[in-house]
Image (spheres, helix red, strand yellow):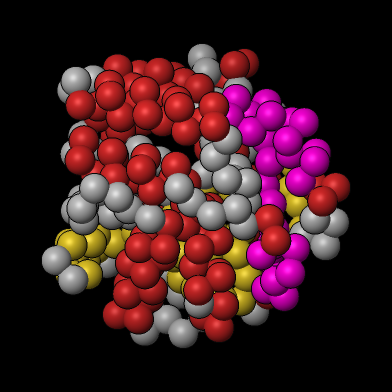
Amino acid sequence: MEKFVMFGDTPLFYIDEGRGIPVMLLHGYLESSLVWDDFASNLKRTNRVIRLDLPGHGLSGEHGDVHTMEFMADAVRHVLALANVNKCILVGHSMGGYVTLAFAKKYPELLNGFVLFHSTPNPDSEEKRALRDKEIELLKEDKLELIARTTAPNGFARDNRKRFADFIDECVEMYSVNEKAGVIASLNGMKIREDMNEFVASTTIPHMFVFGMKDFYISWEVAEGLMAKFPKAETLVLENSGHMGFVEEPKKSLEAIVAFAEKCA
C-alpha cells in the first residue's frame, strides 16, 4: 500500500507492505524509499515493512530551512501512529540512522530495537560541517545533479562499482529529482545534530551496528572504534561492502535484520 498523509503542513509519502514484526526502513541523505525496493521485497516475506520518504526527500515535502533530526523523528512517529504500529524495529541508513537515534531517544517506548546501518552516533566534525556548507552552496547554484553523480558511486566499494553500475545510475536519477530546498534543510539539520554517543552507551533498547569494511564515508578505523566503545551492541561487519551493504551484500544484511527483529520482539 502506498499512501500520502499530512504531517502538519508537510506531505509525507510512505509504503506499507507485508505481515509480521513491523520493521521501518529509513533511507539516507539524497535517497528515498525507492532505495530499499529489492531489500524490502525480500524482507516483506517475513515482516511488515514500512518505508517512508523522509521530509525533503522523494515524494515528501519540506518544512522550512532546517530539518532537525528530531523533526524527522516526529514525522516517523506520525506515520507509525497512522499505521497503527505500537512498536517496531527501526532501521536507519546513514542519515536515516541519525533520525533513528533521535527517535529512540524521544520515543523509546515505541521501539523493540533499532539498527544503525552504515551510520554512527557521532556528531559532525568541523571539517564535515564545512563540506556540508560547500554542498549547500552548490545546491543554491542548481548543481544537484553534479552532487548526485559524485555521491552515488562513492556509496559503493570501489571494486563493486562496475558490478552495480546500473544501480548507481538509478541512484543518480533518484538523488537528482529531490527538491533542492528539502536537501538544504536536511544538510542544515545534520550539521547541528546532537552527539548521541552517551545515549547509545546508556540505552536499554536493543541495537545493532552494520558496518562495511570498504565504506568511503565511515572509515574502518572509526567503525572499529565504535565496536570497541559499544561492546554490548550487536554488530554485523560486511567485508565486501562500502556504504550500501543492503545492496552490495543483501543476503547477509537481510538475514541479520530478520534475526535481530525476531530476537528483539
Residue 84 image point, x, y percent: 36, 84
**Residue 205 counted in the magenta span:** yes
Residue 115 image point, x, y percent: 61, 58
Total labels: the figure holds 0
Q: Which residues are magenta?
A: 199-226
Q: Is residue 127 above or below residue 105?
A: above
Answer with left or right where residue 233 lies relative to residue 142: right
In this view, the residue farthest toward the front is 126
Residue 56 image point, x, y percent: 26, 48
Residue toward you, 214 or 199: 199
Residue 264 showing in the rendered view: yes
Residue, x 72% and y 75% (percent of image)? 204
Answer with left or right where residue 139 lies relative to residue 264: left
Q: Is residue 177 above or below residue 33?
A: above
Residue, x 77% and y 31% (percent of image)? 221
**Residue 128 counted in the magenta span:** no
Residue toward you, 177 or 72: 72
Residue, x 63% and y 70% (percent of image)? 113
Q: Quadrant of the N terminus?
A: bottom left
Q: Looking at the rendering, which quadrant does residue 261 occupy?
A: bottom right
Q: Is residue 241 above or below residue 199?
A: above
Residue 157 image point, x, y percent: 60, 23
Residue 169 showing in the rendered view: no
Residue toward you, 147 or 193: 193
Q: Quadrant of the C terminus?
A: bottom right
